[in-house]
Image: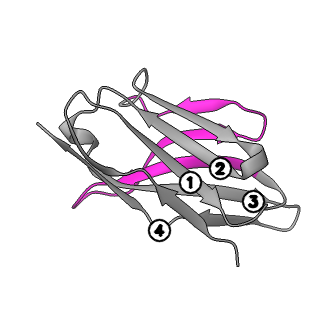
């Protein structure tokens, strides 16, 4: 069973930075997309950023210019560099790997890491 393990969350003041990491316990064949989602209390989970196997990235409008998603394919790891953090960025952040085959699509999720931004 593949596990995604996140790290790097914590408490930071507004304007500060954090770097999240998500490592897969082993290589997963057929991963086409990887990304970060977040869920704030009382809100739905929302997409933060994605990166494809080809290296293309996409961001939610709310984080463009402040967050950067990257990957280390050799280590089956993705990162989320978060800068200029705002209190509204406070949420549990989840990483997601999407495996696609001709038969189906499968999602792998991390356990979540708390990010709290104080004003």
Residue at horizontal 55%, vertical 42%?
79
Crowd around label 3: few <14 · some 14–19 · many ≥20 (10 Å) = some
Q: Measure the C-alpha gap from mark 2 to mark 3.
A: 15 Å
Q: Which mark is residue 22?
A: 1
Left or right of residue 16: residue 76: right
Q: Is residue 13 magenta?
A: no
Judged by depth in the image, the label closer to the viewer, 3 or 1, is 1
Q: Which mark is residue 77?
A: 2
Mark positioned earlier in the residue sequence (3 or 1): 1
Query: What residue is shown with label 3?
Result: 99
Under circle 3, the secondary element is: strand
Under circle 1, the secondary element is: strand
Residue at horizontal 27%, vertical 30%?
16
Mark positioned earlier in the residue sequence (2 or 4): 2
Residue 7 image position (x, y, % from top left): 46, 56
Q: Measure the C-alpha gap from mark 2 to mark 1.
A: 5 Å
Q: Quadrant of residue 96?
A: bottom right
Residues shaded magenta? 32-61
Mark positioned earlier in the residue sequence (2 or 3): 2
């Amino acid at each position: 069973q593949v596990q995604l393990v996140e790290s790097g969350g914590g408490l930071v003041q507004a304007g500060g930075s954090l770097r999240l990491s998500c490592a897969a316990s082993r290589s997963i064949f057929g991963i086409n997309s990887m990304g970060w989602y977040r869920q704030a209390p009382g809100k739905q989970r929302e997409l933060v950023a994605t990166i494809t196997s080809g290296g293309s990235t996409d961001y939610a409008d709310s984080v463009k210019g402040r967050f950067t998603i990257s990957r280390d394919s050799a280590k089956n790891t993705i990162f989320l560099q978060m800068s200029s953090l705002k209190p509204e960025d406070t949420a549990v952040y989840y990483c997601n790997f999407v495996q696609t085959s001709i038969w189906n699509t499968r999602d792998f999720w991390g356990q979540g890491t708390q990010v709290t931004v104080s004003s």
